[in-house]
Amino acid sequence: MKRVLLIVGGGIAAYKVCELIRLLRRSGIGVRCVLTDGGAQFVTPMTLAALSEAPVHTSLWDLKDEAEMGHIQLSREADLVVVAPATADLLARMAAGIADDLATTLLLATDKPVLAAPAMNVRMWLHPATRRNVDQLRADGVTVMTPDEGAMACGEYGPGRLPEPAAIADAIIAALNPDRRLAGRHILITAGPTHEPIDPVRYIANRSSGRQGFEIAAACAAMGARVTLVSGPVTLPTPPGVERIDVETAQEMADAVAAALPADVAVMVAAVADWRVEAAAGQKLKKGTMAPGLSLVPNPDILATLGHSPARPRLLIGFAAETERVVEHASAKRVAKGADWIVANDVSGDVMGGEANAVHIVTADGVETWPRASKVAVARQLAERIADAL
Ligand code: CTP
């Protein structure tokens, strides 16, 4: 039986968790409840205990007497931790990593996925502090549902209502049964910039942070794929379950890609330097000498090489960073490089190194324009699109 640890925060919408517990129990999901002090103002432990058919915990200190049920164990025995209603205060404490009561201590101690269903006044939801906290939690891997829009208990109207219990139950069931459609597939991803040496201390580089490629690697691994991530110099942690090969130059990246084949899918996200210095100096160039004129020669085009190789993966995806006529240039690259899809992004704004991305997917069938979204969301959508195509 799958088990959920349900943390009930202090909001008027807390009464709706009674229905949520009923739906989960009916789906055969075990539920154990923790009530915050605020939550206990709106529903009683007795109600939740009766519906969940399990003891309800409220205080960090009531666990002391139960040798077999410390707070670590309470979070470990669950498959998923759910926070509903997730109040503005609870989201803020989660985002800051505060652990000053049983609920927040469990949230800091857990190694399980966390799903939060927010509910609060519309102004609190739209407040920059809450926006920041939600962004932080999402970056930390917490699934934060979007609240419903409508008339609120306080008489105002707008986004902030707790999603309906049936919608929360659906999200819980999806989180408990993750999409593993990429299991058994090998996905090869390049990410980050390359550094092309001028001398032992100087190099030519670009602004790529590697974040989009790392998020795609994380999303594909989460869907069960074996992921090889060939990364240029970046300062990002390796996503869980991903095999990472660090390289510096375009030539090293090309070699690492060739060595990692065969792959079912290749996603070439790296911003590979188009040129390298023909003869990098063996010693540091001294300022006292003449300013060096750099003679550049083209680097291998990794995507194009793969696109025209007998070892071409079944699905070959390139990225195109453009500052003008984005779709037109991306379509031309798709054909020239022998790729199936080109994910085109307009890098004229703050995309490179930034959090969000606005992309067009150019395929043989046409162009899809995706709404501007976080790099995490773009990665997840792309991984799903890959699974659909295989
Ligand atoms: N790419 C590659 N090897 C290169 C250059 C680019 O594999 N030497 C890949 C990138 O990883 C990306 C795609 O090609 O998937 C397009 O990269 P982009 O820099 O947008 O295109 P370029 O071919 O460099 O063309 P241009 O600079 O003229 O826009």
Image (tube, rainbow, N blue to C red):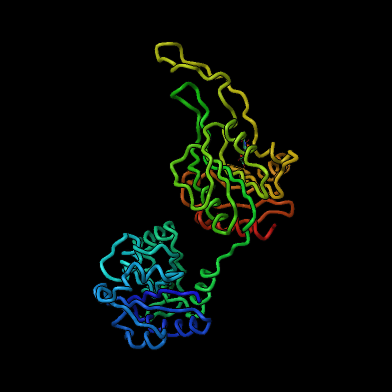
Residue 106 versus residue 291 in the image, above or below: below
Based on the displayed image, in which of its 4 quarters is residue 336 positioned?
A: top right
Instruction: State the residue lying farthest toward the front.
Output: 67
Residue 114 versus residue 27 in the image, above or below: above
Instruction: State the residue lying farthest toward the top.
Output: 289
- For residue 293, side relative to residue 102 (left or right): right
**Residue 141: x and y, percent?**
44, 59
Give the mark count. 0
Assign the C terminus to one quadrant of the image.
Answer: bottom right
Based on the displayed image, in which of its 4 quarters is residue 109 positioned?
A: bottom left
**Residue 303: x and y, percent?**
66, 39
Instruction: State the residue lying farthest toward the right.
Output: 310
Name the residue at 40% across, 79% down.
152
Residue 173 versus residue 328 in the image, above or below: below
Nearer the observer, 274 or 238: 238
- For residue 370, side relative to residue 10 (left or right): right
Residue 248 versus residue 200 in the image, above or below: below
Ligand 1 image position (quadrant): top right
Nearer the observer, 2 or 255: 2
**Residue 44: x and y, percent?**
32, 86
**Residue 138: x and y, percent?**
44, 60
